[in-house]
Image (cartoon, rainbow, N blue to C red):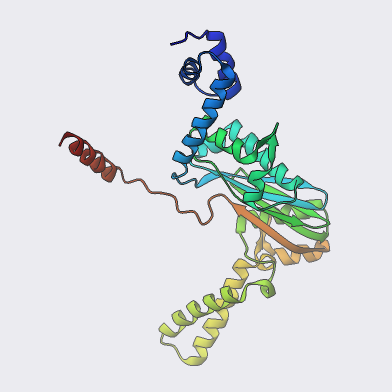
Amino acid sequence: MTQVSAKLVKELRDRTGLGMMECKKALEEASGDIELAIDNLRKSGQAKAAKKAGNIAADGAIIIAQTAGKALLLEVNCQTDFVAKDENFTAFANKVAQIALDNNTTDVAALSALNYEDGVSVEEARVALVQKIGENIQIRRAEIIEGATLATYRHGIRIGVVVSYEGGNEEVGKAVAMQVAAFNPISVNEDSVPADVLAREKDIIEVKAKESGKPADVVEKMITGGLQKYLNEVTLVNQPYVMNNEQKVGDVLKAEGATVLGFRRFEVGEGIEKKQEDFAAEVARSEERRVGKEC
């Protein structure tokens, strides 16, 4: 087997970010040819990425990229919050967000095929990152919000908000974005609440009211009151203002001469079921495999 120098191992490590022993083995298998070693590592990286694809990526980060008249929200997932804070993961997510915005695309398949750098596609860069970090990493979703005046807010790395508004000032826009991050409204006002959501909530309230056994006129008032309480909780203008709970958001907007035209909120892992590890079951499976091999 070809002997490789520590200098060559260091060079490969610097270029790939992989561990010393992995680099040494790759160079030995490539007879000291660093370019061939990199090619082989990329090939094994694709195999490794495929292996990791079965792991649930329910952690990650929300990235916001913005330019004049539009902003993009991007969710990139990984498996642990440790990796979500890794500088390589962060650099990848930020760059992908900018590429998506520059190309005005929110389709993940189309985005994955775009150039990342030096002829390497976004998908190839993702695969390389999976190999380097050792976790499943996925570009999950992206959305572009357009508007003459936009406010953005990111709460840590897990929540991102873009608000389109008119009137008021930058401070009001920022406060509304923080409001959306904290209280998670589903619409700007009562008129924009989806009909199916309203109908489902009304059915639930109605069943509970009728179960009370009270007279019909009282039940009707309970339904009306319950529905209004729900609307106050989920519509932006009816929510208590995050900066002063004694005021409603709608009152603050009116006083500032501002109108919210729309908003979008992304939170990491929404709708993803995180795998719950059963340690006892895993031990049992390991024991079954061991016994099976011995038989």
Q: Nearer the viewer, residue 253 or 117?
A: 117
Looking at the image, which residue is at 45% across and 54% down?
A: 273
Q: Residue furthest bottom?
A: 216
Left or right of residue 23: residue 15: right
Residue 103 position (above or below residue 29): below
Looking at the image, which residue is at 59% across and 35% down?
A: 89
Looking at the image, which residue is at 45% across and 81% down?
A: 207
What percent of the width, then of the height, locates residue 285? 25, 43
Looking at the image, which residue is at 67% across and 73% down?
A: 190
Q: Nearer the viewer, residue 99 or 68?
A: 99
What percent of the width, then of the height, locates residue 131? 51, 32
Residue 32 position (above or below residue 121): above
What percent of the width, then of the height, locates residue 134? 48, 33
Left or right of residue 102: residue 80: left
Quadrant of the image containing the N terminus = top left
Label count reads 0
What percent of the width, then of the height, locates residue 172? 77, 55
Q: Quadrant of residue 288?
A: top left
Quadrant of the image containing the C terminus = top left
Residue 189 position (above or below residue 3): below
